[in-house]
Amino acid sequence: MIEILKNNYRKAKTGYKKLQLYYAVNWTKTLYFNFKKFPFSTAKKLPVFFYGTVKFASIAGKIEIEGKIKKGMIGFGQPYEMNTLHKGIAEINILGKIVFKGHVQFGKDYFIYVGENGYCEFGHMSSLGSYAKLICIERIVLGNYARFGSESQIMDTNFHQMMDTQTGEKFEMTAPIVIGNYNYVGSRVSVMQNTKTPDYCTVASNSLCNSDYTTSGSNILIGGIPAKFIKDSISRDWEGEKDSLDAYLIV
């Protein structure tokens, strides 16, 4: 009897949270975006929700969703974190191409920029926490369950031409970023061009990633400025959390 009551309570709590999500939706931006960017057969299902204030600097680029289309499967500004207030500074500028491969969450007050030649891919249940910044000039790929903490930034460019002052050699300004599946990235992490992480990688908070870390194998912890291998045989308990994550985050 007690177990039945507990299950009913959990279901009621989940239902209440989902009801709160629907009330928090910015329906003007949500309706405009979906019917502007998708065929009617897709748009009527409202796969993309916007929560809170957001500026559409441009949505001229191409947006694709792979897989089964579901209502609210992609949430911009989705209130899934502890903080409850929006500052109203969220902004998207999509000139290139974004591909969503399932459910994706963005926290509050995000900044997303995809340049004209940029390609950005989000795996199923990938996420960027509040105040995150993503700038894609060339190519950024986030794997399934690649989850970033608040105030993180992912940028495949250093914006300015750098050079060797002795030889005059000029360095590449952009390079791809590939984040593996089931990556747990702490808050205030900077991921720069040339970063490549393996599956089941944990990145310590306040780190700067700018290298290929796949040679260290999977189930690793990296961290520091610049980030280096710290420990192996360590991972977030994804299997233990999967059901609760899906139940709480999927609208």
Image (spheres, rainbow, N blue to C red):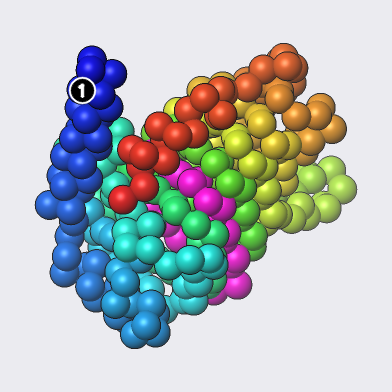
Q: Is residue 181 above or below residue 222?
A: below
Query: At 45% across and 44% down in the image, what residue appears?
Result: 127
On the rendered structure, is 37 left or right of 62?
A: left
Of all residues, the one furthest to the left in this rendering is: 23
Q: Is residue 70 above or below residue 217?
A: below
Callout 1: few (<14), some (14-19), or many (20+) C-alpha neighbours within 10 Å?
few
The image quadrant where one finds the N terminus is: top left
Q: Is residue 179 above or below residue 200?
A: below
On the rendered structure, is 150 left or right of 193?
A: left
On the rendered structure, is 32 left or right of 62?
A: left
Of all residues, the one furthest to the bottom in this rendering is: 40
Q: Is residue 142 above or below residue 229?
A: below
Q: Which residue is mark 1?
A: 5
Q: Quadrant of residue 220?
A: top right
Span of residues in magenta:
109-131
Q: In the depicted view, which residue is nearer to us: 13 or 209?
A: 13
Query: At 25% across and 24% down in the image, what residue appears?
Result: 4
Give, as a three-letter code, the residue at label 1.
Leu
Task: Count the marks.
Answer: 1
Q: In this orientation, does residue 130 appear?
A: no
Position in image of residue 56 (x %, y %): 29, 67
Of all residues, the one furthest to the front in this rendering is: 1
SS category of the residue bearing label 1: helix
Query: At 87% across and 48% down in the image, what residue appears?
Result: 167
Of all residues, the one furthest to the right in this rendering is: 167
Residue 119 magenta-highlighted:
yes
